[in-house]
Image (cartoon, rainbow, N blue to C red):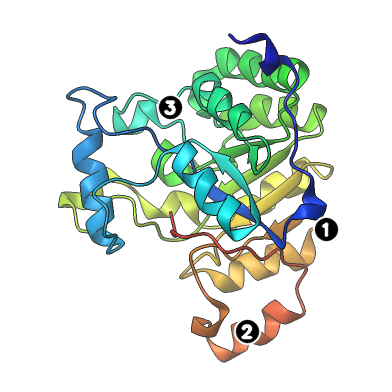
Amino acid sequence: MDARMSKLKIPNIDEFVAIDIHTHAEEPCGMHGADGYDDFQAQMAEYFKSPNKHPPTVPETAAYYRAKKIAAVIFPVDAERETGFRRYNNYEMLELAAENSDVLIPFVSIDPHKGKLGVREARKLIEEYGIKGFKFHPTMQGFYPNDRMAYPLYEAINDGGAIALFHTGQTGVGSGMPGGMGMRLKYSNPMYMDDVAADFPDLKIILAHPSFPWQEEALSVATHKPNVYIDLSGWSPKYFPSWCATSTRSCRTRCCSARTGR
């Protein structure tokens, strides 16, 4: 590991017009051998009507945001157990983020099913690398957020003063594929986050996306628990039902401009 990784730098926020808090880190095609990852990405590109067969790499993403004068929080998703895809190793992603530290703010991802091994990695990432946030995708990782199995990992994140960002609502992952690629939408109902917010009142929690079709549940949790926030990535408020738009304006939300609703 490069010695410079011991101290991650954060972009000078004053130089940007906005911060996108929800951006995915992707590896180039061909990095995963024959595990089906490239085919999966091709299906995702079709679902999102992307002109590219594969999402932009970390350097390409940095260039895109740099040109827009927008800083971006970027992260991989560790879902090896549920998908069979080799995870984008946190340390590999961090090296590229460090090379683009003028615009990228790296978060990391650890599947809660990794147990004590994952907890040790989380504490190391926080203590030695200064990581400020962790990404969870309950549907891709196959777990209910309030499963006590995940609580030791949340405790490590909470102890380190980091943020926990959870995918909520429907996902483009697996859409149009047989059986939705085995992805189960039930895991990402935001109401399960209410238990987490109650059990970890000091943990900063972000509900990613407007949680379709459970916007009411997400708004209920966010207005009731002061440590819960909402990002609006992948979904424009103009598509909200009128009652939801009104409630959102009165809610403590964090808005961002992500390019995908994953």
The quarter holding residue 27 reads top left
Work out whether residue 227 can be spotted. no
> Considering depth in this image, is 55 or 36 the residue closer to the camera?
55
Of residues 60 and 79, the one nearer the viewer is 60
Crowding around mark 1 (Cα neighbors within 10 Å: few <14, some 14 to 19, many 20+) is: some
Q: Which quadrant: the C terminus?
A: bottom left
Determine which of the numbered discs, if any, sits on residue 226 in the image: 1
Residue 51 horizontal side relative to residue 233, left or right: left
Distance from Cα at disc 3 to Cα at disc 1: 32 Å
Tell me what residue is drawn at x 49 percent, y 46 percent: 61
* Secondary structure found at label 1: loop
Q: Which of marks 1 and 2 is nearer the N terminus?
A: 1
Distance from the alpha carbon under mark 2 to that under mark 3: 36 Å
Between 63 and 22, the one lying in front of the other is: 63
Left or right: 161 with respect to 50? Answer: right
Quarter in which the N terminus is drawn: top right
Residue 41 relative to residue 160: left or right: left
Contact, CB < 8 Å: mark 2 with mark 3?
A: no
Q: Mark 3 touching mark 1, by CB under 8 A?
A: no
* Residue 245 - label: 2
Question: Label 2 neighbourhood size at 10 Å, few (<14), some (14-19), many (20+)?
Answer: some
Amino acid tagged 3:
Tyr
Q: What element carries label 3?
A: loop
Q: Where is residue 41 in the image (x, y as percent from the top left)?
A: 27, 44
Q: Mark 3 points at which residue?
A: 88
Look at the picture and state if 177 lies above or below 238: above
